[in-house]
């Protein structure tokens, strides 16, 4: 069993929570409130910018040129696919620069990014890579499942299609391969830290949907 298969199996209950979350089921049905999707996009914009920065900083954690190239390519692919698509969403929804500037970072967006920065701070490319993987992989699985029925709302359908494209699936495959290769070279202690990082990120993904669905604010009660 490969490392990614092992941690994916361990994370199955968490990933099911993401796939069955009301944000996803309502997006699929076309009943997700537009203001919830708008809130999600604004918070995801912050997250994706930090996600890109973390990958670029991770380049300094390794001397392996192939890994360095892949990390840079990941950021370039992210900008072409997700970030550009979201800019189109912002145009369609008339989300202005002023609204972006006035939008506070929601608690779980902050916590997720802080988790990724913490793993980057360990100085381990393997642990950092394991922490980054769920974001890529979970979205691809969700896209593959949702594309079967699609969504009746055009902007939600476009969101789904972003994660079922061949290029995106290939990016996920490369990310898994890299994570497996790093796990093979890791010590038992580092491998355990990789698994922990992967599982924490998986929990953060569930919390991200919930954050958007409740339009979470600082000081908000559970």
Image: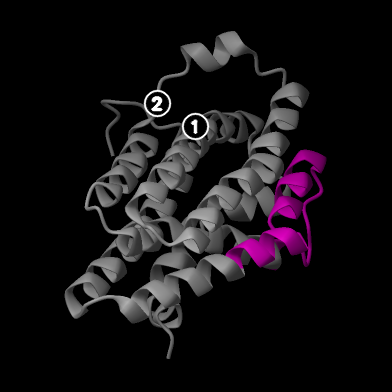
Question: Between residues 28 and 113, which one lies in front from this camera angle?
Answer: 113
Q: CA distance from mark 1 to mark 2?
A: 7 Å
Q: Is residue 157 magenta?
A: yes
Where residue 165 sits, quadrant-wise, is bottom right
- Name the image quarter holding residue 210: top left
Answer left or right for 77 relative to 100. right
- Classify 10 Å Cα crowding around label 2: few (below 14), some (14-19), many (20 and above): some
| Residue 217, position as x, y percentages in the image | 36, 27
Could you say where residue 57 lies in the image, as x and y percent from the top left? 39, 42
On the image, numbered disc 1 is attached to which residue? 43
- The residue most toward the bottom is 1
Instruction: Find out whether the residues at labels 1 and 2 contact each other: C-beta distance under 8 Å.
Output: yes
Instruction: Give, as a single range, the part of the protein colored magenta.
Output: 145-172
Identity of the residue drawn at 22% across and 53% down: 122
Q: Taking the image as drawn, is residue 51 in sight?
A: yes
Q: Which x, y percent locates residue 216?
A: 39, 32
Which of 221/200 is in front?
A: 200
Which residue is label 2 attached to? 105
User: Is the C terminus in the top left, top right, bottom left or bottom right quadrant?
Assistant: top left
Sequence-wise first label, 1 or 2 = 1
- Residue 170 lies in the magenta-colored region: yes
In the image, residue 215 above or below residue 120 = above
Q: Residues within 10 Å of mark 1 (few under 14, many from 20)?
A: many
Above or below, comparing residue 144 to residue 117 in the picture = below
Task: Identify the mark at residue 51; answer none if there is no mark.
Answer: none
Label 2 element class: loop
Left or right of residue 98, residue 1 in this image: left
User: What SS does tag 1 mark?
Assistant: helix
């Amino acid at each position: 069993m490969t490392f990614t298969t092992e941690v994916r199996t361990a994370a199955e209950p968490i990933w099911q929570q993401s796939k069955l979350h009301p944000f996803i089921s309502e997006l699929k049905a076309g009943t997700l409130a537009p203001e919830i999707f708008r809130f999600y996009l604004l918070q995801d914009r912050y997250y994706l910018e930090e996600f890109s920065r973390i990958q670029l900083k991770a380049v300094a954690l390794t001397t392996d040129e192939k890994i360095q190239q892949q990390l840079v390519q990941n950021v370039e692919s992210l900008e072409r696919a997700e970030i550009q698509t979201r800019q189109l969403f912002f145009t369609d929804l008339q989300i202005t620069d002023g609204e972006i500037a006035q939008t506070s970072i929601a608690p779980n967006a902050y916590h997720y990014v802080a988790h990724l920065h913490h793993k980057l701070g360990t100085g381990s490319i393997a642990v950092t890579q394991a922490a980054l993987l769920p974001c890529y992989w979970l979205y691809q699985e969700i896209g593959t499942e949702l594309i079967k029925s699609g969504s009746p709302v055009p902007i939600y359908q476009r969101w789904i299609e972003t994660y079922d494209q061949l290029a995106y699936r290939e990016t996920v495959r490369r990310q898994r391969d890299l994570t497996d290769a790093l796990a093979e070279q890791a010590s038992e202690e580092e491998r355990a830290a990789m698994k922990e990082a992967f599982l924490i990120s998986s929990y953060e993904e569930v919390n991200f949907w919930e954050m958007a669905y409740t339009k979470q604010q600082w000081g908000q009660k559970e």
